[in-house]
Image: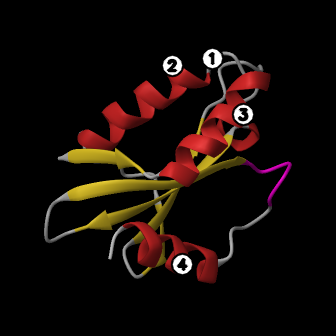
Amino acid sequence: MKINRIPTFTKSAKKLAKKYKKLAYDLEVLEGELQNGAKTAINLGNDFYKIRLKNSSIPQGKSGGFRVVYFFKTKNNEIYLLDIYTKSIIENIDKDKLLDLVKTYLL
């Protein structure tokens, strides 16, 4: 399974990495989990998923960590990381924004 990062994900991750120094490590762990078939992702519909990611920079569990939204393209068996954010900044992500990201970068 191939994992791709779209530009908006990379931009959000770089911004968060300035504050949370261990984010790169956390993302490596996440990509390993996704390649092994992570079971903790929440299905948002239309092949969109949201998964909680532990923030190793703070002493809280996954609930205080990051949220990563990804798109699973079943035809190619590929995962596209769309966005990453902290729950303290964004409670829930807008589905229209996700559809726009897919149309812009994947279609």
How far, Cα to Cα, is label 2 from label 1?
5 Å
User: Which secondary structure type mostly characterizes the magenta part of the structure?
Assistant: loop
Q: Are marks 4 and 3 in contact (CB under 8 Å)?
A: no
Residue 22, which numbered label?
1
User: Badge 2 is on which residue?
Assistant: 25
Image point (69%, 48%), residue name: 85
- Span of residues in magenta: 86-90
Image point (55%, 73%), residue name: 98
User: Badge 4 is on which residue?
Assistant: 100
- Mark found first going from the N terminus, 1 or 4: 1
| Mark 2 element type | helix
User: Badge 3 is on which residue?
Assistant: 16
Q: Is residue 51 visible?
A: no
106 falls in the magenta region: no
How far, Cα to Cα, is label 1 from label 3?
10 Å
For label 4, the crowd category at 10 Å Cα-Cα, with few meaning under 14, some 14 to 19 and many 20 or more, is few
The part of the image, by quadrant, that contains residue 53 is top right
- Mark found first going from the N terminus, 4 or 3: 3
87 falls in the magenta region: yes
How far, Cα to Cα, is label 2 from label 4?
29 Å
